[in-house]
Amino acid sequence: MRSRHDPVACRVCPACENLEPIREGEAVWPAGWQCANCGAAVPLSDGVPSYAPRLADTLTGFDPAAFDWLVEREAGHYWFEPRNTLLLALANKYFPKSGHYLEIGCGTGFVLDRFTRARPWASVTGSELHPAGLKHARARLKTRAFFVQMDARRIPARDAFDLIGSYDVLEHIEDDEAVLRAVHSALKGGGGFIASVPQHPFLWSAADELAHHKRRYWRGELEAKLSSAGFEIVASTSFAAIVTPLMAATRLRQKKARMEDFIRREFAVPRPLNFVLKAVLNAEVSATAKGLSWPFGGSRVVVAKKRQQRCG
């Protein structure tokens, strides 16, 4: 039950920054919303509220054309499916009662789909900078989620969500700390944040350049940035630890790559090899869910919590 001292969930007008309380059962960013203070209206793009229309489908952090081939290759893939299992296990373990969930950079909706099918939520929202990704996410989830086009550095909400996820998104954004501050503001006190990012700068390769990455994270880097933004670190581990040597061997020897080569190597994996790698990563995820923390791996996954505000 909400205490009278708890902050009220609000949406933020992108024009005048006025805070408007969000009523129970109402979407955080409803279509057709207009600011009662300044009269500014948020434009719609194919029915989706658009808070950063100037950046929509630009080469800002990601190539929007990639969504078309990504949506055909995520299901069954040895890396994407175990990662989904890990992320959901962490959400269920650390935030089992969270009701209002936001995914930043939801892409094609592959993770969002898994989350909505796994347990009941009061509301689920998928955000994405690129409408090209939202097209696939909306087709995949239908009415199981709300959607919004926005810049993650400027989340137009305060104290609105119990849980926010950002999965392999932060590395695409130059000012990742601005995103963490925005996430902190959008979360309720005690709310959770789960983030995954590529790890180990020594693994930087042509694949990172093709993916428009700004960085691979040092171990402890994301945790330090989260702490500076006002978060408490709850858990931290690596993902894809067992297959990291294979990843290093295949990536580091290739200094340049065309997109066609990258897609073939990363996604068109022979079925027998995909089966083996998926089994290996599923075993790793099972061990992680039981409490094992891996010191190295291709990705870092961090679970954090917004510190509760204290009165007096």
Image (cartoon, rainbow, N blue to C red):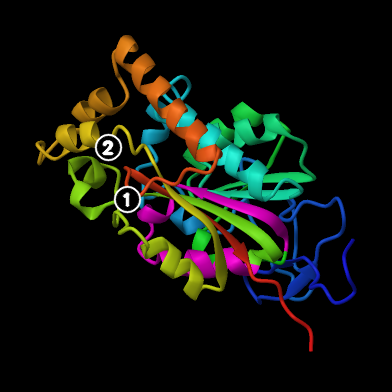
Identify the residue under disc 2: 244
Q: Is residue 88 magenta?
A: no
Q: Residues within 10 Å of mark 1 (few under 14, many from 20)?
A: many
298 sits left or right of 195 in the view: left
Q: Residue at x 35, y 49 (%)?
A: 295
Q: Are marks 1 and 2 in contact (CB under 8 Å)?
A: no
Segment tinted magenta in the rendering: 160-185
For residue 18, above or below residue 202: below
Res. 41 visible in picture:
no
- Asked whether 93 or 256 is in front, the reply is 93
Q: Is residue 120 above or below residue 192?
A: above
Secondary structure under badge 1? loop
Residue 5 against residue 263 in the figure, above or below: below
User: Looking at the rendered structure, which numbered label has been put on residue 122?
Assistant: none
Q: Which residue is mark 1?
A: 199
Q: Residue furthest top?
A: 272
Q: What residue type is disc 2 on?
A: Thr
What's the amino acid at mark 1?
Gln
First-in-chain label (1 vs 2): 1
- In this rendered view, identify the residue nearer to me: 157 or 120: 120
Left or right of 128 in this view: 72: left
Q: Quadrant of residue 206?
A: top left
- Give the image location of residue 299, x and y in percent: 37, 45
Residue 129 is situated, as x and y percent measured from the top left of the image, at 49, 50
Within-10-Å neighbours for mark 2: few <14, some 14–19, many 20+ = some
**Percent x, y for residue 262?**
23, 31
Residue occupying the point 42% across, 55% down: 170
- Residue 164 visible, this angle: yes
Q: Quadrant of the N terminus?
A: bottom right
The Cα–Cα distance between marks 1 and 2, rounded to whole angstroms, is: 10 Å
Q: Give the secondary structure at mark 2.
A: helix
